Amino acid sequence: MPAWAYHPYRLFWQVADLLFPPRCVGCGRLGERWCAACQAQVPRLGGSSLCPACGYPLPAADEMCPTCSQGPPRWGFDEARAWAFYEGMMARVIRALKYRRRFGLGETLARALAVWARDLPWPPGCLVPVPLAPARRRARGYNQVSLVARPLAWLLKMPYCPQALQRRDGPTQVGLDWRARWHNVRRAFHAAPRVRGRIVWLVDDVMTTGATLHAAALALKRAGARAVYALTWARVPRRISPAARPTRSRSSPHVVLEPRTSSYPRREVAHVRSPR
Ligand SMILES: [Zn+2]
Ligand SMILES: [Zn+2]
């Protein structure tokens, strides 16, 4: 559907809000899905002090985070950026969209994200949502990522390509530790030949270890995608090790990274990157 389709979509939600006034997901105020005051509570990730590979906030600009700086390029995607940390208000919004069927939040979030995404230093591409595994999709009835990614594509005036990526059934990533996540997802995705030569904005709700986005991006690259940029609205803050805690700064509470010993399992990633 072309970009103008956003307007009837927005109108639909405005009418729905009049008929069934929502309550703010943050403060419960009647008549708003997510009020401006509650949106303002979300600390945004931005500025120049981001890891150029994975987008994680850093204490200084123009260097990679400890995880990314270990050895040769490790990510399937070219760059990754997240709008906010997955905590507090942001976690509440994502859970409401994912588990409580607050579909209207998709449109609200897309509008907020579009303002930010227009300034990303990426060339335009087609938006591809990370799909759910078929069994999970049937059980939930919808993909919460699509509820945001579709209006976001309209607002950015970019093509929306939900069929470009397929996912096989497999165990959920929720509740798994980092090693199990990498192992679990490494063969999960298959990309359609239509992505050959194209620039892809790969869209997901939360980046945790990056394993899912990495595996999905590799599948897109194997199918011939020219570049893959990973966009999420939230990013799980990395664990702060007790030894590193004294250097934690008040202005950027999450910049202290995990110790090197707790990085991704290199053997698994090597396997993913060079399938035989
Ligand atoms: Zn509110
Ligand atoms: Zn990094």
Image (spheres, rainbow, N blue to C red):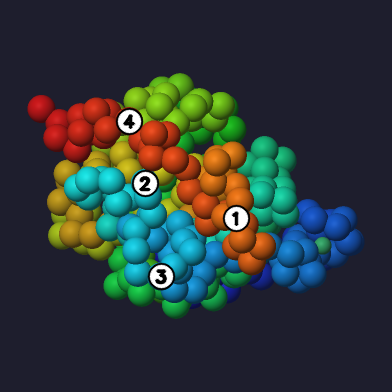
Query: In the rendering, which numbered label is found on residue 248?
Result: 1
Please, what is the three-letter code of the amino acid marked with disc 2?
Thr
3 or 4: mark nearer the eye: 3
Residue 185 shows in the view: no
Closer to the chain start, of discs 1 and 4, is: 1
Secondary element at image label 4: loop
Query: In the rendering, which numbered label is found on residue 265?
Result: 4
1 or 4: mark nearer the eye: 1
Label 3 vs label 4: CA separation? 26 Å
Pinpoint residue 171: horizontal percent, then vertical percent.
45, 22
Pinpoint residue 121: horizontal percent, then vertical percent.
36, 74
Pinpoint residue 220: horizontal percent, then vertical percent.
24, 47
Closer to the chain start, of discs 2 and 3, is: 3
Please, what is the three-letter code of the amino acid marked with disc 1?
Arg
Label 2 vs label 1: CA separation? 18 Å
Q: Quadrant of the N terminus?
A: bottom left
Secondary element at image label 1: loop
- Residue 153 in the image: above or below residue 208: below
| Label 1, ligand 2: CB separation under 8 Å | no
Closer to the chain start, of discs 3 and 4, is: 3
Circle 4 crowding by C-alpha within 10 Å: few under 14, some 14–19, many from 20: some
2 or 1: mark nearer the eye: 1
Secondary element at image label 2: loop
Q: Which residue in the structure is indicated by mark 2?
A: 67
Label 4 vs label 2: CA separation? 11 Å
| Label 3, ligand 2: CB separation under 8 Å | no
Please, what is the three-letter code of the amino acid marked with disc 4?
Pro
How many numbered markers are drawn?
A: 4
Please, what is the three-letter code of the amino acid marked with disc 3?
Ala
Q: Do the residues labelled 2 and 3 touch (CB within 8 Å)?
A: no
Q: Which residue in the structure is indicated by mark 3?
A: 61
